[in-house]
Image: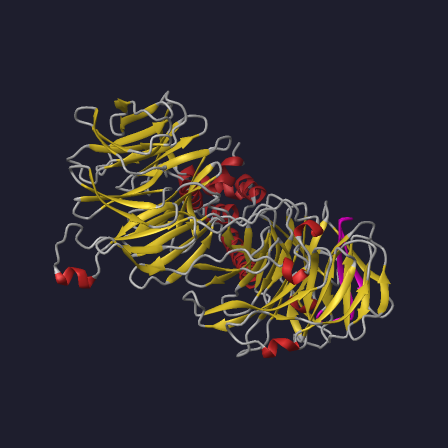
């Protein structure tokens, strides 16, 4: 393993024998609450049975607060960022330490043990206290500015807790049912709590010094969702689903102004004053309040509360597009889409990170978008939940970008650099099943093609200066319609990318010409792609397609257990590959040999000769269906994935599985290899994308270094024995992990006589042992 092999062209290629996980893109937000830490470094999100702390800069989950058999209802982070309180569906409240002392609990463990323990602490978080408040499930919480008092709201009322001394300080009973909103006055001297319930649309003001409601702020006619306070604490802004903003004067709690915003408000924040407002020094009744709102229309709007006008409107979220007019059919005719409703793009929350100067918008489809508050331009977008990963392709570049098809109607493009940034490609109206990429040499830009359950094929091209602030973005340039069922496979021509082939559940294949793309101009609607031919190809669904490196042949794989070779020029059948016992999920031409690779639900991979359609090799090792297989290392190796959750690397010449990569917990639908072969991506039904980096060179160098070190130590041992320095010899033998050699040295007569003439203790021997080898000595003591 690791030896160089020659390709048919005579070029020597090193086999890849070891991969390490460089990045794991896992789910971190599945809906619910989101909160930005005060220092702006972390984003806390609700994710099923856990609250996760995501590092905003890197996009990596730093900490996970999880209860395996429970579900998060709500949570709140203390203003001093020291602890987190989580409400669980089991009606328990748990207080977790957020910042753990680095030296805590390390004890006398070795360096490796310390590192593992530190990593485990970072991932899990530490529960400092757990209690059941006996007021039903808590659905709203707030912590006062001093991080001392915790207010919890449920259907039975409000309770206030002392987080330091761990006891209940107040038991408040507002009328109106379930408490949906709680917030403290920003000045800790006031000891004032604001609350609102689902049935009662008013805002109640509670004086915690007297434990009574001192005011009821009436004005909203629907549920209140958000409140915010001005910097000078003279005004409070409230928003709700009645599509208005109310400005309240404090401390009189009187309604000062009402501003209609014409959408249900799900989140609002008060923005810092601009430099111009500060220089003018104007002092009006509302000073220069600027409020940003987000809601059910999918637009973040900025309002000037002095003039009552909208000063900015950020780009709206793209809405799902219907392709029924392109298909010439209705949903009722389609059958599969009958009864489906279009889900609108809406914001579910809006946060503000003062330290970063960014607005954070949360959408219904689990996207989190960051906007610069000074320029109102988009900075980046994170995806909290991808659902099942169905297909992936690398798009080239020094830090390879990755195109991903998930169980949704958008194609997702991941840009990797200093931090993660996703672009969502909107166009398909139903789930995208397959994608492929054509990556030409620079300065030409890559093309992307996708196929979907909406019966269409779409071609996307990369354009400079994206409309949303990106340096570039992918735009749909062409649409191909004509299939009558879901399109499950698609592939580019490999030489020039001048055509696309597709295969569908209607058992046909089509070849689409991309010549009309040359007439497309930026800002125009996608052009219609013409078909050169349509061919009835299989008896069952077509799952996979590929085009040969010289663009002369294409191969299809189907649920009918066969793969077929076709002429690209006229769609004529060249040959049938028979031998699999179950449906075929993946096909690919070798980049260097005249052979085809297939992967099947019968747990095997097969290599077929193109000239006579005979089976050359069969690879066995997966225990369940093989779902994807690709050539790597310039055709000298194969990477495969299956329903067993494993990724395997095979040597083509020897049929040997050289390594198995195990990170997924469910079936792995897709794997992709970067052009240089240094990166491998895997994605599956567990919503996890693993980016693996080839570390073969590093591993081989470490193995060679270990061999050289062992040779030197063997020589040292021989020298010490020759010199009758048995104490040093025992230490070297222990370092070599040779307990029997230690026993032989110590039991020798010459050693006994030598040691008898000088005082030797266990500690003397211990001092010659390399760290990490003492355990072997202890295990073999008699």
Q: Is residue 81 magenta?
A: no
Q: Which residues are magenta?
A: 591-609
From the viewer's perspective, tell me whether residue 594 is left or right of residue 662.
right
Q: Position of residue 775 (x, y in %)?
A: 49, 39
Which image quarter is the N terminus in? Answer: bottom right
- Residue extending farthest to the top is 134
Residue closest to the eye, 241 or 448: 241
In the image, residue 85 sits, relative to residue 523, either above or below, namely above
Q: Position of residue 255 (x, y in %)?
A: 21, 40
In the image, residue 690 sits, relative to residue 399, either above or below, namely above
Q: Position of residue 535 (x, y in %)?
A: 81, 65
From the viewer's perspective, tell me whether residue 617 is left or right of residue 341.
right
Q: Position of residue 567 (x, y in %)?
A: 81, 72
One can see residue 685 in this view: yes
- Which residue sits at x=85%, y=68%? 573
Q: Is residue 606 magenta?
A: yes
């Amino acid at each position: 393993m690791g030896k160089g092999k020659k390709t048919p062209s005579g070029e020597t290629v090193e086999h890849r024998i070891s991969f390490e996980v460089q990045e794991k893109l896992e789910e971190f937000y599945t809906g619910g609450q989101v909160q930005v830490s005060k220092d702006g470094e972390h984003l806390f999100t609700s994710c099923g049975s856990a609250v996760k702390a995501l590092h905003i800069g890197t996009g990596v989950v730093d900490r996970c607060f999880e209860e395996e058999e429970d579900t998060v209802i709500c949570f709140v982070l203390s203003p001093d960022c020291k602890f987190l309180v989580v409400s669980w569906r089991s009606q328990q409240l748990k207080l977790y330490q957020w910042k753990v002392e680095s030296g805590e609990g390390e004890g006398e463990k070795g360096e490796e043990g310390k590192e593992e323990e530190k990593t485990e602490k970072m991932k899990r978080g530490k529960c400092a206290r757990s209690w059941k408040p006996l007021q039903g499930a808590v659905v709203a919480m707030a912590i006062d500015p001093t991080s001392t008092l915790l207010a919890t709201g449920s259907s039975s009322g409000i309770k206030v807790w002392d987080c330091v001394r761990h006891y209940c300080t107040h038991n408040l009973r507002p009328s109106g049912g379930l408490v949906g909103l709680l917030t403290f006055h920003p000045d800790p001297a006031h000891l004032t709590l604001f609350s609102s319930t689902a049935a009662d649309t008013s805002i109640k003001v509670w004086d915690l010094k007297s434990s009574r409601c001192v005011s009821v702020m009436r004005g909203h006619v629907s549920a209140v969702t958000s409140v915010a306070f001005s910097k000078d604490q003279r005004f409070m802004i409230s928003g709700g689903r009645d599509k208005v903003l109310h400005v309240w004067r404090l401390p009189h709690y009187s309604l000062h102004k009402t501003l209609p915003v014409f959408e249900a408000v799900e989140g609002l924040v008060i923005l810092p004053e601009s430099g111009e407002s500060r220089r003018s020094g104007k002092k009006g009744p509302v000073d220069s309040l600027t409020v940003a709102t987000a809601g059910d229309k999918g637009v973040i709007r900025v309002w000037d509360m002095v003039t009552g006008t909208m000063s900015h409107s950020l780009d709206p979220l793209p809405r799902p597009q219907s392709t029924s007019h392109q298909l010439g059919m209705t949903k009722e005719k389609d059958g599969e889409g009958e009864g489906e409703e279009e889900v609108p793009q809406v914001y579910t929350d809006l946060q503000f990170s003062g330290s970063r100067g960014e607005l954070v918008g949360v959408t219904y489809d689990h996207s989190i978008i960051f906007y610069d508050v000074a320029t109102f331009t988009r900075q980046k977008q994170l995806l909290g939940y991808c659902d099942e990963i169905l297909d992936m392709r690398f798009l080239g570049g020094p830090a390879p970008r990755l195109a991903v098809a998930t169980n949704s109607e958008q194609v997702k493009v991941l840009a990797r650099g200093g931090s993660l940034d996703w672009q969502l490609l909107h166009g398909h109206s139903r789930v995208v099943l397959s994608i492929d990429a054509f990556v030409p040499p620079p300065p030409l830009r890559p093309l992307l093609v996708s196929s979907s359950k909406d019966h269409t094929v779409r071609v996307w091209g990369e354009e400079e200066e994206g409309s949303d602030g990106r340096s570039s973005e992918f735009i749909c340039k062409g649409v191909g319609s004509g299939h009558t069922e879901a399109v499950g496979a698609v592939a580019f021509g490999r030489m020039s990318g001048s055509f696309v082939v597709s295969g569908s559940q209607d058992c046909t294949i089509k070849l689409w010409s991309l010549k009309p793309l040359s007439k497309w101009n930026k800002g125009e609607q996608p052009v219609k792609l013409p078909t050169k031919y349509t061919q009835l190809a299989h008896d069952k669904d077509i799952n996979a397609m590929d085009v040969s490196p010289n663009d002369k042949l294409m191969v299809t794989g189907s649920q009918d257990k066969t793969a077929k070779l076709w002429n690209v020029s006229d769609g004529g059948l060249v040959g049938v590959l028979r031998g699999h016992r179950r449906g075929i999920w993946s096909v690919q031409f070798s980049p260097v040999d005249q052979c085809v690779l297939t992967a099947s639900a019968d747990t095997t991979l097969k290599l077929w000769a193109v000239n006579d359609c005979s089976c050359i090799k069969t690879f066995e090792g997966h225990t369940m269906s093989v779902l994807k297989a690709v050539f790597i290392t310039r055709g000298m190796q194969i990477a495969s994935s299956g329903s067993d959750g494993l990724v395997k690397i095979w040597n083509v010449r020897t049929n040997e599985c050289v390594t198995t990569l195990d990170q997924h917990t469910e079936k792995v639908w897709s794997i992709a290899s970067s052009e240089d072969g240094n990166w491998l991506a895997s994605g599956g039904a567990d919503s996890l994308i693993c980016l693996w980096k080839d570390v073969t060179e590093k591993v081989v160098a470490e193995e060679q270094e270990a061999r050289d070190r062992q040779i030197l130590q063997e020589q040292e041992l021989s020298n010490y024995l020759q010199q009758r320095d048995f104490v040093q010899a025992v230490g070297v033998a222990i370092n070599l992990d040779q307990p029997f050699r230690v026993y032989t040295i110590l039991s020798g007569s010459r050693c006994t006589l030598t040691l008898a003439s000088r005082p030797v203790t266990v500690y003397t021997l211990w001092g010659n042992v390399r760290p990490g080898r003492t355990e072997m000595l202890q295990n073999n003591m008699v």
